[in-house]
Image: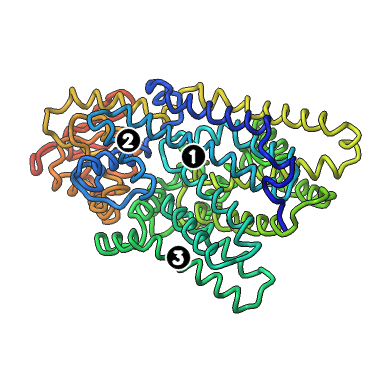
Amino acid sequence: MGQPIGKHGGARPDRILIALLAAGFLLRLALAWAPFAYLARRGPLIDDAFYSFSIARNLARGAGPTADGVHLTSGFQPLYTLCLVPCYRLSPKGSILPIHLALMLLALCGAATSWFIFRITRRFASRRGALFAVFVWTFSPTVLSQGANGLETGLLGLLVAVSLDFYLGSVRESPKPWRLIVMGLLLGLTFLARVDGILLAAAVVFDLLRLPLAPSQRLRAVVGMLAVLGITVSPYLAWLIFRFGVFLPESGVATRFLSLCYGTRFVLGARSAMFFPPETVPLVYYAGSLRKALQTLVTEPMLFPLSFLTSGAASLGWLGPRTWPAVGGAALLWLGNLWMLKRPSGIGEGAWRGFARVAGTCAALWVPAYAFGSLGQWWFSRYFSPLFLFCAILSGTSLDRLGEGLACLRRLGGRRFVALVFCVQALFFAAQVPETFLRHKPNLNVSEYVQAARVLGGSVPPGSRTGAFQSGTLGYFARTQVLNLDGVVNRDAARALREKRMVPYIQDEGIDAVMDWPWILEALLERRSPQGAAGALGTPRPTGPFLLILVQPAGEPVAKRTIQK
């Protein structure tokens, strides 16, 4: 049986918990309403978020699900994008206010997630452990930035936490029909928030099948829950199939292919990058992608006390390509020793086993899904946000194990030990603040795209069409029509990329200019076009960090050129 929430004095929301929840909400609120200039240059907003913003804006205007106003797309997460539509209904002519309203929604999601983290952790840990889990989630710069990036990350985190709390506290203890209906609905909403939420459903099914019930009862529980999940997502899947002929958003297929077009640039570094046919992926790519994914997880100080070792090694430069296996091995050894320590008295054995199975299964599925299954270099930390949520919960249980399992820490005294842990954890978080919130990151922030939209307005005549591979922010702010070229929200462009006919596609679409980063133009325009065709588009000229190509009319003789490296 898990720890009942609200029936014991130590489990009730107290002043410390209320203070943590309030602090987390105020921090997220401050980010949501920070000046847009800060959000664009040093804040957490990212270019991909502007695809969702553009689609929601067009839905609010009655133009349908399109990012560029031309091509209908399935390349968005449906639940989050639909939640954004009222933001654009409230401000139909505004571009900035709806963004703040969207971030406000994400702030509410992040603050609510903290409460459910407390509830989950309290089922199998002490009050101080649950408070520490909330502290880790509340003040982590990684979590704060992910929750305000403008994408569905914060909504996904909330639905994962709600689903896990309901499963551990209700379904697992007594899988009654009405509880299975609610569980299926929650998992369906998690899938609609982000399609890889289906991995959480798989983990829950795995644990359900191991409950001490008759085989027929387990089977009925799983079938009933999955049936409700299927009914919940069926309207969305039917729309995908009948409108686009696919089962999943087109953005997933496009990003997998795009990652391969960049070769090993992000795996081995730009200087040692090598390119290969996307149909034939070398083993070095898989190995590098897995390494990057694992490094993303272990370098974030989210899993106490392991992150004291791994994050400390990363800050000292000890977590390079050759040394990270040794550091990771030491961390796993440390974890093994930690789990041999005495468990705190009164722990919810059933809830703990359920959490351990669900979290462990999710980790076993999530990491390969992005390192191998997705064939993508997409180890960005936001993709692992559910795993960071599990890490915060595990941090609370680890605090209990150390505090009661080591005699030296028991002699130190509970309050002193907890105060020491909170202070050390806070120092790790403080070290992340400059990089996360204070420094300008040109390749991650969106300020260059905003500036490029202004430059574009003075470089091409009104009514022109511009093509861009990274078209999120550019298309949102530009006064001219900007068509997506990397296929994330344009399946015609995705097809042209696969068939290596980007230049003919640009000409067929009547695009008057192409604008993007030089290395993207090299990988996705020059390499994905017939040999020598890219130079026939026009002469690239620098506009800040980007290159702008004013497209020559088709058939006009132009000297052979190549994209500037």
Structural crowding at the residue carrying mark 1, measured as other residues with C-alpha within 10 Å and reported as few (<14), some (14–19) or many (≥20): many
Q: Amino acid at mark 2?
A: Cys
- Image location (x, y in percent) of residue 473: 31, 33
Q: Secondary structure at mark 1?
A: helix
Query: Residue at the location (75% across, 43% down)?
Result: 126
Q: Is residue 111 above or below residue 26?
A: below
- Image location (x, y in percent) of residue 405: 86, 45
Residue 530 seen in the current view: no
Query: Residue at the location (47% across, 37% down)?
Result: 271
The residue labelled by disc 1 is 109
Image-based side of 407 in relation to 216, left or right: right
Residue 514 seen in the current view: yes
Image-based side of 145 in relation to 276, left or right: right
Q: Compare residues 309 and 121 and report the one nearer the observer.
A: 121
Image-based side of 353 in relation to 486, left or right: right
Q: Secondary structure at mark 2?
A: helix
- Image location (x, y in percent) of residue 553: 9, 39
Q: How many marks?
A: 3
The residue labelled by disc 3 is 228
The residue labelled by disc 2 is 87
